[in-house]
Image: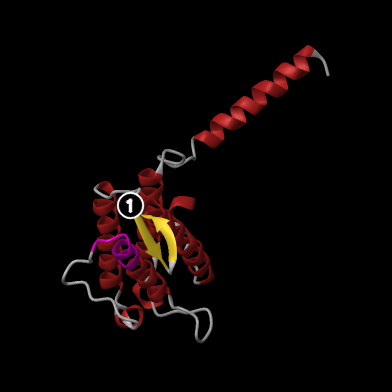
Amino acid sequence: MSTTGIRVATAAALLTLLALAQNIPPGIGQGWLPEFNHASRQLLQLAEATPAEKFAWRPAPGIRSVSEVYMHIAAGNYFLVNQAGVKPPADIKITQTTEKEVTAKADVIRWLKDSQEWVRQNRAKADLQKKVKLFGNDTDVDGIYLRILVHNHEHMGQSIAYARMIGVKPPWSE
């Protein structure tokens, strides 16, 4: 390849990288909190974009509905922060049936938002090196917060798949 060809290829590659960089959400690769905030924003955007009548939709019998997935995330946030040593607020009652009981879109979104804020508030003041148990295994509080982040992303992927199956395009992909 000639020197001119190499320069053209290099310039094209740089332009491509610049174009891709324009679509990178803020906070990516900037640490735990920006990553959690990114996942939280997208979960809320997707929940808000989903019509209320679709919150009862499920891909098959016995599989979580749209509302149950979001409630599973919210309940998981409270449960995992509790495992890090912080009791949920007194008005939060999580049972084995909470996912199935809270189904109205506004209520589900409120639970999701409140649980995300609970995670943020408590991680900010947590002793991340404190040793704890999670599902019978030794870990530290930092490991529990990592589990929260992974759990939110795992079910965001599920929620994206559900949304596309019911004709909802994730708002950030427009």
Quadrant hosting residue 1: top right
In the rendered image, the vertical position of residue 173 relative to residue 20, given as above or below: below
Residue 81 visible from this viewpoint: yes
Q: Position of residue 131 (x, y in %)?
A: 36, 55
The magenta segment is 77-86
173 and 162: which one is in front? Answer: 162
Q: Is residue 120 left or right of residue 158?
A: left
**Residue at image point 39% right, 63% down:** 133
In the rendered image, the vertical position of residue 156 relative to residue 63, given as above or below: above
The answer to if 159 sits in the magenta stretch is no
User: Seen from this angle, which residue lies furthest bottom?
Assistant: 61
Q: Position of residue 140 (x, y in %)?
A: 38, 54
**Residue at image point 50% right, 81% down:** 63
- The number of callouts visible is 1
**Residue at image point 46% right, 65% down:** 155
Q: Position of residue 163 (x, y in %)?
A: 48, 67
Residue 174 visible from this viewpoint: no
Which residue is under mark 1?
130
23 and 99: which one is in front? Answer: 99
Badge 1 element: loop
Kindly report the secondary structure that dominates the magenta region of the rendered protein: helix
User: Seen from this angle, which residue lies furthest top?
Assistant: 3
130 and 96: which one is in front? Answer: 130
Q: Position of residue 9 (x, y in %)?
A: 72, 23
Q: Label 1 is placed on what type of residue?
A: Lys
Quadrant hosting residue 5: top right
Identify the coloring. Answer: secondary structure
